[in-house]
Image (cartoon, helix red, strand yellow):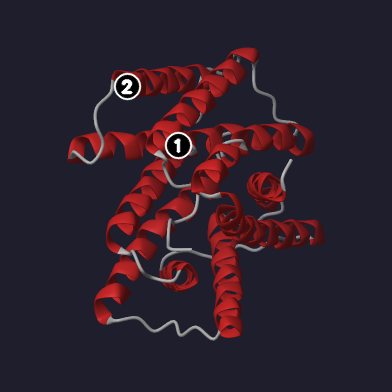
Amino acid sequence: MGAGNAVAFASAITFATSITLVALIYEAGANVHAVNLARALAFAGVVALILALRRVSPVLPPRATMQCTLVGLLFCGELYGLVASIQYIPVGLAVLIMYTYPLLVAIAGWLSGAEPFTLDRLLAILAAFSGLVLALHAPGEQIDWRGVAWAAFTAGSFAAVLIVSGRTMRGIDRWVMMLYLTGTTAVVVGAASLTLVDLEWPRSGEGWTALTASTGFYVLATILLFTAVKMIGALRTAIIDNSAPVWAILLATLLLGERLSPVQLFGGGLVIGAVLLVQLSLRVPVRTVKAPK
């Protein structure tokens, strides 16, 4: 395995770990707003430090500032939706639904005329959604559709981030863009916490440890992802990054005791395989916002 491949796998594993730990944070009494605020503030701080070390100014022209802020608002949906879904459905299932975003990008491409309509892509999308139906079939228990809705909202939000940023934000330094994304998220979550919702932090040392680790893994996963894209390219990174649902399912089994039935696992494998085929045909960007390297 080459160094770039190893970095890409490390990104997928650390991302899955960060999401899995969120379930433990909830068990310790924290809520989704605290998790998101911690992530946004930590990520914005790291990005600001990177920009300072590189001596890159974060100031952009007014039009670019508005575009970055708009994408930041869409990014809020992606960041909020995934950790919200884990309150209601298993971690592996939530991540699996999120990773259907390339299918939504493909559909948007067809509707806009940017991508050709082909039979193989249509069959892959039908197979993916058939697999998702199987994955949502939980024998002996009822799937909480609030979690499914939040995870689907995450997929839609992230697809929108990719589409909007890909069309309007070429030429903007990726770290400057990430500063605006995370900064916007921190402002939105912080303002909501002061006016609309209550922040609930962990009530135990174990909960604070899980929050710190989850936040750190989330930031590390994104930095590793950028590094992998630079080393081996977006397409190869995307292929490896598609393994994140597998790692999430395994980690949720080990750390949380979550179990998916054989039918659900088969459905999940069908989704992952079909999404991979769509990514290969479209060269869809990976989990982070595509920007000049």
10 Å neighbourhood of mark 1: few (<14), some, or many (≥20)?
some
Q: Amino acid at mark 2?
A: Leu
Q: In which quadrant of the rendered view does residue 191 lie?
A: bottom left
Q: Residue at x 54, y 73 (%)?
A: 44
Viewer-side label of 1, 2: 2
What amino acid is at disc 1? Answer: Arg
Q: Which mark is residue 41?
A: none
Q: Is residue 12 left or right of residue 292?
A: right
Task: Classify mark 2: residues with Cα within 10 Å, few (<14), some (14-19) or many (20+).
Answer: some
- 112 horizontally vs 33: left or right: left
Position of residue 11 relative to residue 129, above or below, is below
- Say if residue 141 shows up in the picture: no
From this viewpoint, which residue is outermost toward the right? 205
**Residue visible at 52% across and 24% down in the picture:** 273
Residue tagged by mark 1? 146
Do we see residue 242 in this rendering? yes
Q: CA distance from mark 1 to mark 2?
A: 28 Å
Badge 2 is on which residue? Answer: 122
Disc 1 on helix, strand or loop? helix
Position of the N terminus, as image quadrant, is: top right
Which badge, 1 or 2, is on the more N-terminal residue?
2
Circle 2 sits in a helix, a strand or a loop, which is it?
A: helix
Question: Residue 27 in the image: x percent, y percent?
Answer: 70, 48
Q: Residue 170 sits in which quadrant? A: bottom left
Q: Position of residue 65 (x, y in %)?
A: 32, 76
Displayed quadrant of residue 39:
bottom right
Residue drawn at the location 33% of the way across and 55% of the way down: 166
